[in-house]
Image (spheres, rainbow, N blue to C red):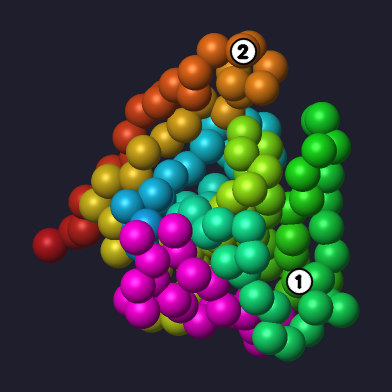
């Protein structure tokens, strides 16, 4: 259910790209992924439906990267290099948004983040998406 609390402002590191996102189910959809790209990127993401990411400024500063199947775009700022969002491969009607780009949110706000098995992606194996594990953040005292 989308409500006002699910609408968040976001931007890249340098502020050239500013956007608004309507999260599909708040932060109940957070995750990380083990695929080669996500593993290197290390972002925690939350989901937004198609049309749920509105670039308010700097669309011309966004650049994209496609890999493996080349079926989806990963967006990042061409000035500061920060990844903002990408279209999901397993459900191209969804976008995954980098929670670190959202105002007032840090990936360290989440004690546990599900990690999905992107190495054995459902579109490659034909099997349901598998949870590979859980990433935990335990703050120092």
Q: Which percent across, then down, holds residue 76?
A: 74, 64
Q: Of helix, strand and loop, which one carries label 2?
A: loop
Judging by the rendered image, the residue that carries numbered circle 1 is 77
Of the 4 image quadrants, the one containing the C terminus is: bottom left
Residue found 59% across the figure and 21% down from its top: 122
Task: Determine which quarter of the picture holds residue 52.
Answer: bottom right
Q: Is residue 83 visible?
A: yes
Magenta span of residues: 1-24
Q: Residue furthest left?
A: 141
C-alpha span from label 2 to label 1 = 33 Å
Q: Is residue 11 left or right of residue 109?
A: right
* Left or right side of 7 for 38: right
Where does residue 89 sit, x and y in percent of width and height?
67, 37
Secondary element at tag 1: strand
Which numbered disc, 2 or 1, marks the residue that appears first in the sequence? 1
**Which residue was labeled with disc 2?**
126
Rendered image quadrant of residue 98: bottom right
């Amino acid at each position: 259910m989308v409500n006002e609390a699910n609408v968040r402002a976001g931007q890249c590191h340098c502020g050239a790209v500013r956007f608004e996102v309507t999260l599909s189910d708040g932060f109940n959809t957070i995750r990380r992924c083990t695929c080669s790209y996500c593993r290197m990127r290390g972002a925690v993401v939350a989901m937004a439906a198609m049309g749920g990411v509105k670039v308010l400024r700097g669309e011309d500063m966004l650049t994209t990267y496609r890999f493996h199947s080349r079926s989806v775009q990963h967006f990042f700022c061409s000035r500061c290099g920060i990844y903002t969002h990408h279209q999901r491969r397993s459900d191209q009607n969804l976008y995954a948004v980098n929670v670190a780009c959202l105002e007032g949110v840090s990936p360290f706000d989440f004690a546990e983040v599900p990690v999905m098995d992107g190495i054995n992606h459902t579109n490659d194996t034909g099997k349901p998406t598998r949870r590979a594990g859980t990433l935990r953040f335990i703050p120092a005292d």
